[in-house]
Amino acid sequence: MNEGNNAFVVGGKSFTAVAINCAAKAGEWITSKLGNHSSLQTKHSSHDLVTEVDKGAERLIRNLIGTHFPHHSFLGEEGVEPGPEASVQALEEVSDAEYLWIVDPIDGTTNFVHGFPFFCVSIALAYKGEVIVGVIYDPIKDELFVAEKGKGAYVHGKRMRVSSDKTLKDSLIATGLPADQQYALPLNLRGIQQVAPEVRNLRIVGSAALHMAYVAAGRLSGFWEIGLNSWDLAAGALLISESGGTVTDTKGAPYTLSVRNVTATNGHIHDELLQKLAKVEANE
Ligand code: IPD
Ligand code: CA
Ligand code: CA
């Protein structure tokens, strides 16, 4: 940690401990609001929802991180104007940051709003553009997924490994139905039509970050989705690579913070999935 000369830093907590603390506190508060949120607004499209709980959880996380690491940069979904262009620009604006926290306070807001118990808090820390800490917390199951660069990935203290499935036909795969109806949804639907008959089965459960955590834990063998943002992917990408899996964009280029179209697998089925998406041009 390089915070030694900073008089305002509270305590000497590690980055990971702070990320876990933020995720746990936010998760507890979010579940206390389940079925009890008061404002529901739409963002970029009528399918893109936000509540006061998303905003409050992000504020809580930002304040806590700011208390420990006041000189770190912060990129949270709710601090960015809706829509893909603003997301790309917001990431560009922090591209010089040494330490950058990337936060999705609730990934799976539609599920949260409907009381469907599959959503999470996603918190990542990048150092000079590379993710070094990833924490995803599912407050409903009280499952905490944690990864540190070079030190492995764990769920409740137990080391995670990706699945060993070797072919798509033996694999359970997940994807999403993006809110962007103009570009991302039609492409993803084309991919679904191509991939669904080739796999054991397909799941679309409504939280990209939790899908990524499930790939890391070996519960899914792969996930892809078009039109995501850095806050949906950063923590999950580290969880998967530290569990022995592979994360690229949908054309096979290595994962970076600017990836928006993702393919994330156990490694064994990666090329096969990329090829299926490419075959119907569902990859860009
Ligand atoms: C959404 C979820 C969903 C995915 C969407 C994301 P949000 O994030 O991850 O599964 O299909 O593309 O935008 O809006 O709930 O944070
Ligand atoms: Ca999200
Ligand atoms: Ca969100």
Image (cartoon, rainbow, N blue to C red):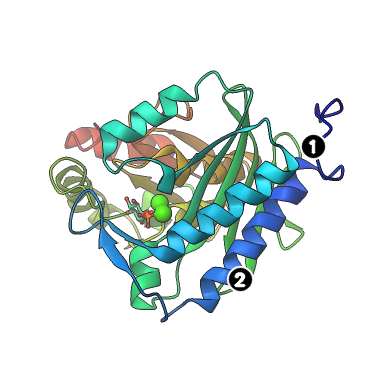
Image vertical order of residue 73 relative to residue 204, above or below? above
Quadrant of the image where one finds ligand 1:
bottom left
Q: State the image coordinates of residue 264 (x, y, percent, origin top left).
A: 45, 42
Which quarter shows the C terminus? top left
Q: State the image coordinates of residue 226 (x, y, percent, origin top left).
A: 29, 41
Q: Which residue lies under the disc numbered 1?
A: 8
Question: Gap between marks 1 and 2, in whole Å?
Answer: 27 Å
The residue lying toward the viewer, choosing from 146 and 152, is 146
Element under disc 1: loop
Q: Which residue lies under the disc numbered 2?
A: 28
Q: Look at the numbered discs 1 and 2 and tell me whether their residues touch, using CB distance below 8 Å.
A: no
Image vertical order of residue 83 relative to residue 106, above or below? above
Q: Is residue 35 left or right of residue 157?
A: left
Residue, x 86% and y 28% (percent of image)? 4
**Based on the displayed image, in which of its 4 quarters is residue 276 positioned?**
top left
For the residue marked with disc 1, what is the amino acid?
Phe
Q: State the image coordinates of residue 262 (x, y, percent, origin top left).
A: 38, 38
For the residue marked with disc 2, what is the amino acid?
Glu
Q: State the image coordinates of residue 138 (x, y, percent, origin top left).
A: 56, 65
Query: What residue occupies the far front of the structure in this picture?
Result: 7
